[in-house]
Each structure stands twice: as structure tokens, then as C-alpha cells.
Amino acid sequence: MQLESTKYLFDVQSAARTLAGFVAGRDGDSRQRDAMLRAAVERQFEIIGEASSQLGRRDSTLLARIPDHRRIIAFRNILIHGYADVDDALAWDIVQTRLPLLLAQVEALLQRKG
């Protein structure tokens, strides 16, 4: 794996871990009431999506090993360009149901690097 590809995977891993830390012990209601938490969650999703997009430009075969990569990048684009239409309930669902899987997939890829 090229150094640049490893960097982007590490960026995804770091943002996913940070995001998981932000929401630990929180429920959907607390996220709804806390504008700073919502902004922090969205920012980490933006980083995950942008790092994934950059990885795809450099190593599309590696990115393809992350099953939801197209959705991840599309979600980033919604956050950036369609920010007024962000569904908070959907974002919270992604945090709860898909983020742990993404983190596991990226960590597995980083363990196999080399």
C-alpha cells in the first residue's frame, strides 16, 4: 500500500474514532439539542468522506474494499453542498449502525498494509 493511501485510511480511522468519542454516552435527543455536537459530528463525517474521496483518486481498488464507499462520499457531499437538507435522524442512525463497521473495515485494511 502506498504511503499516501495509508495516510487517507488513517484520516478516516482518526475521524471515525473521534466521532465515536463525541457520541459515546449520548442519545439522539442530546444530539438534537446540542448544536455544537451536531456540528462536530458533521465535521468528522466530512473528513471521512473527503479522505475517502481522495483515497479513491489515488487507489480506487483499495477504496473499493470499503463496501459503502460511494455512500460515504455522497453523504459528505450532502453535508457540504446540501447542508440545509441534512436529516439529523439519518446522521444519528449512521453513527449508531454504520460507523462501527466502517471503523472495523478501515482498521483491518491498515493492519494489512505493506
Image (cartoon, grey):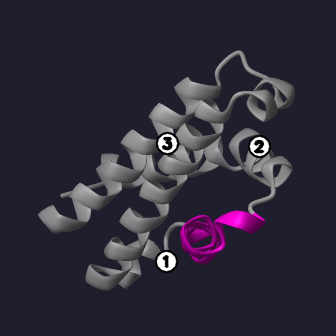
Q: Which residue is mark 2?
A: 92
Q: Residue at x 16, y 68 (%)?
A: 2
For marks 2 and 1, give the one nearer the viewer: 2
Q: Which residue is mark 3?
A: 16
Task: Please check the rendered image and state whether residue 75 is part of the magenta-colored stretch, yes or no.
Answer: yes
The quadrant the C terminus occupies is: bottom left
**Marks 3,1: beta carbons within 8 A:** no
In the image, residue 10 sits, relative to residue 8, either above or below, namely above
Q: Dot 1 surroundings within 10 Å: few (below 14), some, or many (20 or more)? A: few
Inspect the image, locate mark 1, and give the three-letter code of the amino acid beneath it. Answer: Ala
Q: Which residue is mark 1?
A: 64
**Marks 2,1: beta carbons within 8 A:** no
Q: Depth check: 49 or 58 in front? A: 49
Q: Depth check: 2 or 39 in front? A: 39
Task: Return the x and y of residue 86 as percentages of the image width and height.
Answer: 74, 61
Task: Return the x and y of residue 46 as percentages of the image width and height.
Answer: 49, 58
Disc 2 is placed on an element classified as helix
Q: Quadrant of residue 92?
A: top right
In the image, residue 37 sits, relative to residue 109, either above or below, namely above
